[in-house]
Amino acid sequence: MNKKAVALFSGGLDSILAIKLMLEQAIEVHALNFLSVFCDSKFNNRKDGIIKSAKNLKVPIEIMGITKEFMEIVKAPRYGRGSSMNPCIDCRIFGFKKAKIFMEEIGASFIVTGEVLGERPMSQTRHAIDLIERKSGMPGLILRPLSGRLFEPSMPEKMGIVDRARLLDIQGRSRNRQFRLAKEFGIDDYPTPAGGCLLTDKGFSNRLKDLFKYNAGYEINDLNLLKIGRQFRLNESVKLFVGRDEEENKLLLKLLRPGDYVFDVVDIPSPIGLARGDLNEQDIALISSIIARYSDAKSDTVTLCYKVIPSEKTNTVTVSPATEKILSPFRI
């Protein structure tokens, strides 16, 4: 066993501190980040932030895209879900197995994580941590510097590679000790602690369930769309996405693909509407009325234009803005 470790790195304060504690003990750390569509509410340069955090720590970083593989776990987790669609235990097992492969590839000897005993109710209880470590095939090879003294000594500790006396005994959901430690280390550039996984969000989870139900052949594009705007299920084959601001309008336009319908109100500030599916005239009228409701139009009738991608041919339709009673049954 050598003094080289792979650190699972989210870019959050806990993982930053875990790496820092290892660097203080002259451990050579290689950060590993798993990136999926579930990491952010929108496309907000999470990857750039991860790279910046690793650079600040002066450690190399490997960013691994896992969305396609991870979707199989999301659909059918062996160890169940939390309050939403979050398969936290299966997720951790999956991550450690991937980390083990990477560890062997680079010749490292153990894994470091920022886990804190009792901080997360599903995956960081003592029982869950023990289960995850066993099922990952990594008994004794996972070191948790922030809570290390609360666990049995890991192999790096037993072999004298890591000094157990310099590990911490943090537990529970309070972050006060982490904040103090960050101040001691002079670390002030880290994200505000919050649940970063969209699978824990009930609204997003409802959208994901809808996708699973009506679109078995979904693509990454469909998953990214779940994060944007107001969303409506008109029928089994038609779904509508309505931007809430200029940023979301731009994101919707970036995700257009052939066959999609794009709607816009004529000459009035309004949301962009992206409709996907087999639309008939009734669908077009309903979609237009929903979009008109969220526009700045003040009249009883509103004219919209729409086209089918990639055609440049534009059609127009005039409708009355939908009432809440009309659109409510379709809202996801």
Image (spheres, grey):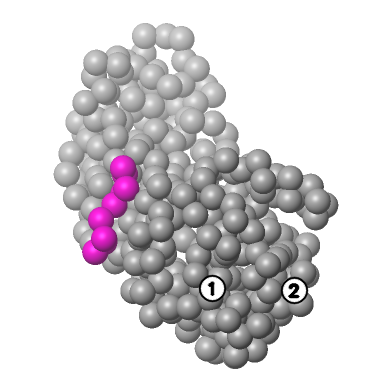
Q: Position of residue 184 (x, y in %)?
A: 81, 51
Q: Which of 69 and 5 is in front in this view?
A: 5
Task: Residue 153: give its label.
Answer: 1
The residue shown at (64%, 89%) is 2
By secondary structure, the bulk of the magenta-drawn segment is best described as loop
| Residue denoted by label 2 | 25
Q: Nearer the viewer, residue 31 or 207?
A: 31
Task: Bin the neighbour count of mark 1 within 10 Å (Cα to Cα): few under 14, some 14-19, many 20 and up.
Answer: some
Image depth: mark 1 or mark 2 in front: 1
The residue shown at (61%, 64%) is 145
Task: Residue 175: give its label.
Answer: none
Q: Where is residue 120 in the image (x, y as percent from the top left)?
A: 45, 49
Q: Which of 164 and 275 is in front in this view?
A: 164
Residue 72 visible: yes
Give the residues in magenta: 77-85
Q: In this view, does 18 lie above or below 304?
A: below
User: Label 1 sits on what residue type?
Assistant: Pro
Residue 315 forms part of the magenta stretch: no
Q: Which of 228 and 118 is in front in this view?
A: 118
Q: Position of residue 124 (x, y in %)?
A: 44, 55
